[in-house]
Every structure is written in structure tokens, then in C-alpha cells.
Amino acid sequence: MQPTFQTVTVLGVPFINTTAATFLSTLQTRIDQQQATFVVTANPEIVMYAHDHADYHAILQRATYITPDGIGILDGAKILGHTLPERITGFDTLQALLAWGSDHHKSAYFLGAKPEVVAQLGKILPQRYPGLNIVGLRDGYFTDEQAVATDIAAKHPDMVFAALGFPKQEVFIDTYRHTTHGLWMGVGGSFDVLAGAVIRAPKFWQDHHLEWFYRTVKEPKRLKRIAVIPHYLHLVRQQAKRARSSK
Ligand code: UDP
């Protein structure tokens, strides 16, 4: 039996309330049983985007699982009186699934990132994950979306990782995920990290919940992501106040 997770809803987005380990084993069971699965790993920027875009919000509602990818989500849950045990990030989930997929000879399709990153992945992935059956590896700057979708469907991979950035990756997954019985997950900039094009924050910064700070200093374009946080927290506090007054 797979656990159905309790959720904590932050600004209309239901986050699963579980640990990364339990979530991972649930995904593995679903992949083994060929249950179609759509995973969104959401941070406050995604929540705010969904808050402002009804179409995107509807896509998130159709996801199988939404995980808290970002300390801001844990903070938001706390303001609402709930404790989510830990972040479940796209990058960590991707890495864990690839290692497991290699051990169990699963197939994976990689879609996204720039051509030079994909070329690098073509070298790294077979070395790092020798048992993984890589059935597709293509960059995210395609023009013929239908041809890409047809190729994925023809390969019927156990796992599809879409690294197109949001909202593009979730829109793509929502449109085509029913063409296979596998897992589909949006993984943002993870291919860049896997390929070594972007360096993840050292462990110290991760452990002190300061990865966002480290990465913003390294990549100032990420400031946009942080800029939404005050407004996000303000709206969460309003949600908390409404919840209290309706009791
Ligand atoms: N990307 C892509 N196709 C596009 C736009 C973006 O493949 O049309 C890729 C981009 O190369 C990068 C990823 O999507 O690898 C998005 O990275 P970003 O850091 O913006 O995503 P986040 O981690 O913030 O979701």
C-alpha cells in the first residue's frame, strides 16, 4: 500500500507533509507499478506565480504530488501552524532517482537545458549511472514540441525529467504526461548542476538554510526569486489570519 500524504496548503498550493525518504520510496513503488505520476517541486516563486496565473494554478492542482522545494515553503507552513519535516528538492530527488534507476535498470528521458550542457550530460550520466537506460537526451530549446512529445511517448520511459524552468516544464508535462505510464518531474536548473555548469552551494550554506543566499551572490539574476519573498510571506500571514478568524 502506498501512503497517501497529508497536505499543508500554502496560498492554495497543497504540499505533501512527509520526509524525503518516504516520498522517494513512494515514487519508486509507483514507477515499479507503472503508475503515471506528475511531481512538482515548488518554491515561493512558483507559489506566487500560481497565485497570479490561474492556468498555472490549475496545472499544479492536477499534479500527483507537490513537494516543498525551498525553506520559504517550510516557513510559510509554520506561519499557518503546521510543521513540514524538511525540504524535498528537485535536485536531491532527481539524484536519488537516478542512483536507484541505475541499480534497478530503469529507463530515463532527459529533456532540457542548453545544448552544451546536454553534451556534457551525455558523457557524465553513463559514467555515473551505468545501469540506467538513457532513452532520450535532448536540449530544451526545441521548436517542434509535438515531435519531442512523440519521441518521449515512443520510448515509454520509466522517468521523464524536464529541465525547462517553470512554468514551461509544468505546462509541457501537464500536456503530455498521459502518453506514458511513467514518472514526470520538472527539475528546473538541475541539469546545469548535474553537468557542473552551475555549482551547488557548499554543505555549510545548505545546512544553514542559506543556499539561496550563496546562489544569489553567484548568480545575481536569481534576485528576482528572492524579491517575491516579502509579498509571499505577507499573503501567507493574511491566510493565517483568515484561518484564525474563521475558527
Ligand atoms: N531552459 C530550457 N528551455 C527554455 C528555457 C530554459 O531548457 O526554453 C533551461 C535552462 O537552460 C536551465 C533551466 O531550463 O537549464 C532553467 O533554469 P533556472 O535556473 O531558470 O530554473 P529554476 O531552477 O529556477 O527552475
Image: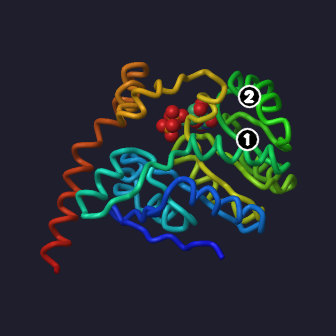
Camera-nearest residue between 90 and 12:
90
Q: In this rendering, would 190 be left or right of 15?
A: right
User: Residue flagged by tag 1: what amino acid is it?
Assistant: Phe
Say which residue appears at 85% left-offset and 49% top-offset: 105
Callout 2: SS = helix
Camera-nearest residue between 87 and 226:
87
Say which residue appears at 76% left-offset and 24% top-offset: 119
Q: Position of residue 53 (x, y in %)?
A: 40, 56
User: Residue flagged by tag 2: what amino acid is it?
Assistant: Leu
Q: Position of residue 141 (x, y in %)?
A: 67, 34
Camera-nearest residue between 195 and 224:
195
Q: Quadrant of the N terminus?
A: bottom right
Q: In this rendering, would 79 be left or right of 69?
A: left
Q: Quadrant of the C terminus?
A: bottom left
**Residue wearing tag 1:** 110
| Colour convention of the picture | rainbow
Q: In this rendering, would 167 be left or right of 11?
A: right
Q: Position of residue 30 (x, y in %)?
A: 70, 65
The image quarter in which residue 171 lies: bottom right
The image quarter in which residue 116 lies: top right
State yes or no: Cβ of the residue under disc 2 lies below 8 Å from any atom of ligand 1: no
How far is the residue under mark 1 from the one under mark 2? 9 Å
Say which residue appears at 46% left-offset and 28% top-offset: 203
Do the CB atoms of the residues marked 1 and 2 lie less than 8 Å apart?
Answer: yes
User: Which callout, 1 or 2, points at the residue further toward the start of the chain?
Assistant: 1
**Residue wearing tag 2:** 121
Task: Report the number of numbered marks.
Answer: 2
